[in-house]
Image (cartoon, rainbow, N blue to C red):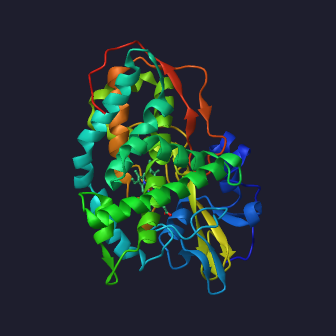
Amino acid sequence: MTTDRPVIEFDHLSAEYAADPLGVYRGVRSRCPVAWTEAHGGYWVASAYSTVFAASRDDKTFSSKKGRHGDIDYTGVVIPSEPSLPLLPIEVDPPELHPFRKVLNPAFGPKAVARLAPEIERFTAWCVDQVIESGEIDFVEDLASPVPAVATLLLVGLPVTDWQRYSRAFHGLAANAPGSAEYTEALELIHSIAGMARSEIADRRLHPKDDLLTTLTQAEIGGRRLEDAQIASILTTTLGGGIDTTTALIANALVYLDKHPEHRTRLATDDAFMSSFCEEMLRYYSPVQGFARTVTKDTELGGCTLQRGDRVFLSWAAANHDPLAFEQPEEIVPDRFPNRHTSFGIGSHRCIGSTLARAEFAVVVREVLRRMPDYTLVDGAVPYSNIGTVNGWHRLPARFTRGRPVGATS
Ligand code: HEM
């Protein structure tokens, strides 16, 4: 064990990071698999696969909790921490986490996603119908943003007609720096959504339906029904987890395929190839770049001594490009196998929506490649200026040979 504290210049929310995340991590990793930055009040950055893996699997030492407990101010899962109540279930540690996952898991499993698939396909075809005769599309606005929003709303049971409101709110939160006007506006929108969700919760208590909201109103944890505030918190996490993340994954894949049209025909028809391609897009672009933990007791990680109360940023993105874990880590290998990426997290909080995200990805990318097989991106693409939360795009305009609508209903 060493008490050395290698200090690095690092801020996952900075413009330098957004411009070259792989280069930044290359530099950081070469210094130390775990290093300290003074940004945002100071935090450790875990950048090697081994350290990210070890910390993610040790909830007792690396806590997702938020708020003051004993003499520690817990950060929750984002740095800088938001002045709000802990989000359920993502900011709860085991064993309290387990009953929440038990209630939630069936609604996100393969059977539930298979039931949603026809609606996701129909809505995707409808989105393409809206633009197919014009020969022009903004892949983010017209497709990659609406589809995950609608799919997530369908899953939870909120009205899908409001998808733009949800999409704007979570897009705004992910794409802008904490403290900016856009970020504050997005936060206000999310609070108003949480208020609106309460009337839906009241409705489900009286009129149960076949949706996650109803499951939550009927669920008991520790012999007690969930309170409205707990259900609203789970909804916020689910919407936040489900909407902008998958948008970013799809958008980055369409950027890659713009430069690599040689994969298009095979992807449109070969499901196994689509599946490995999706995993490689997840690995390479790491839609969620990292999440934070708070250290509960003095410990050692990657040769450094971390102290009780310290904060750590577990970088999924850095782990995904660690040369000790992946061959050619900075190359995109569409049929890479095995591909043990960390993009859905590791351990007890591993993404509950991964099956849904993969399904949406395949539906949208296939629909694009079948109906606009010759698309090319045109001027006007705008990446997020801050990718430390979600590595996404604001705009992605493209042109393609015009086609005919298939008459899909929304
Ligand atoms: C490409 C898409 C996605 C990515 C990259 C992603 C990434 C992640 C990651 C890294 C975590 C782990 C958090 C942690 O360890 O602290 C997570 C958790 C979570 N995700 Fe996703 N996610 C995606 C899609 C979705 C979807 C579609 C949904 C729901 C509709 C969703 C809902 C959640 C929820 C509720 C959690 C918290 C689980 C828990 O705390 O036990 N995610 N996600």
- Left or right of 126 in this view: 186: right
Q: Position of residue 125 (x, y in %)?
A: 31, 29
Left or right: where 313 falls relative to 194: right
Q: Quadrant of the C terminus?
A: top left
Q: Position of residue 220 (x, y in %)?
A: 31, 77
Residue at 68%, 54% (x, y): give it. Answer: 178
Name the image quarter holding residue 213. bottom left
Relative placement, left or right, of 365 versus 253 is: left
Is residue 350 in sight in this rendering? no
As rendered, which of 204 and 311 lies closer to the eye? 204
Is any part of residue 79 visible from this angle? yes
Whole-percent x and y of residue 95?
41, 80
Q: Which of 181 and 397 lies nearest the eye of the viewer?
A: 181
- Residue at image coords 38%, 41%: 161
Residue located 63% across and 49% down the image? 185
Q: Residue furthest bottom?
A: 70
Up-down: is 389 above or below 34? Answer: above
Residue 3 vertical position relative to residue 213 in the rendered view, above or below? below
Q: Is residue 380 above or below residue 159?
A: above
**Quarter of the image where ligand 1 sits:** bottom left
Most foreground residue, 42 or 142: 142
Q: In the figure, 183 relative to 200: above or below?
A: above
Q: Where residue 100 sits: x, y (%)?
A: 37, 72
Q: How many marks?
A: 0
Classify the position of the N terminus by image quarter. bottom right
